[in-house]
Amino acid sequence: MLDEIKQAYYLMGTIVEIILYLDSSTLSTALIIEKVLAEFNRIEKIFSYFDPTSELYRLNLQANNQPIKVSQELFNVISLAIKYSSLSKNTFSIMLSPLMKSWHRAEKTNKLPSPKTIKNKQKLTNSNLLKLNSVTQTIFFQKKGMSLDLSGFVKGYAVDCVKNMLVKIGVFSGLINAGNSSIVTWGENPNSNYWPLAINHLQNNSIIAILNLTNTAISTSGTNEKFFIIENLRFSNLLNPQTSYPLTGLVSATVLSKSALEAEVISKMLLFLGQEETLDCCEKNDLAVDSLLIQKLDENNNTHLSYTENLPIIF
């Protein structure tokens, strides 16, 4: 008989739901929870954009002046993010912080940023300006005003790390859901063999379909939750790295992949490139996409779904 752990915590700026099944005769429930929280907190201490004591915060503060030596983990994750930016045709980027600050400022002043402002900030988002030295393990920003924000990318990374740790110590099966955007499942759900996940309508949040998940990771990116209101116009907080302007309209992209980190990248590709080009790009660059779904709302509030045939979906 397996024991169930079902908890929710506020971690890394979002609600993280954890459902685990294990043999408590060999594993301590309290120790498992302690290890989960410790791993999330360890990762946040490295990658937090807002915490003044985090390693990333220190890097953003100092790397405009000189090369900064960083931990191997931070160096590896930033290097991986830059690689994914190239593979995704620059639809995914960790370099958008200067632009995002301009849009936040525009929201506060209720005045759209000028094309000149956008153009100037865009110059700070070129990944070629990020100098990574693997020998000295240092990072240098070659233009003043550059900064990095790993946000969703590192959330996927954290979910993968916690899952891998739990598998290693003998947790048979589980689900980790970070903010409904980065999710990983492994093993069988003892109650139904699979892990059901609702797909909600973009506007009224009603359930329009169910995904039956087994041994997979999933990422969902969309324009329906976080947005700006500027001059009575609505803009999503998802910036298109190619144009530096927010994605418009109501749209969401869901990707099933081998890891939550890779699913995060591919979900951005799906938003900006569409289904056909995303699948083609993944095939050419050996990105592991299992299946995907995109949901759009037209001007008449009609829902349009497009998905791959192998998506484990029930209507």
Image (spheres, helix red, strand yellow):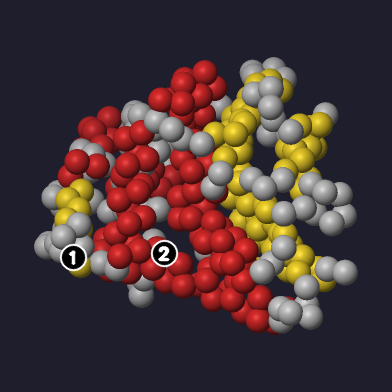
Callout 2 environment at 10 Å: few (<14), some (14 to 19), or many (20+)? many
Secondary structure at badge 1 equals: strand
User: On the image, numbered disc 2 is attached to which residue?
Assistant: 48
Residue 266 place in picture, x, y as percent:
49, 36
Q: Position of residue 23 (x, y in %)?
A: 78, 73
Q: Determine if residue 73 is in view.
A: yes
Q: Is residue 35 left or right of residue 207?
A: left
Q: Residue at x 43, y 45 (%)?
A: 107
Q: Is residue 155 at all visible to an observer of this figure?
A: no
Q: Badge 1 local density, few (<14 within 10 Å), some, or many (20+)? A: many
Label located before the other in sequence (1 or 2): 2
Q: Quadrant of residue 251?
A: top right
What amino acid is at disc 2? Ser
Q: Which one is closest to the eye, mark 1 or mark 2?
A: 1
**As rendered, which of 102 and 53 lies closer to the eye?**
53
Nearer-the-camera pick, 50 or 7: 7
- Tag 1: amino acid: Ile
Name the residue at 69% across, 22% down. Answer: 309
Q: Nearer the viewer, residue 251 or 24?
A: 24
Where residue 250 sits, quadrant-wise, is top right
Mark number, residue 68:
1
Q: Secondary structure at mark 2?
A: loop
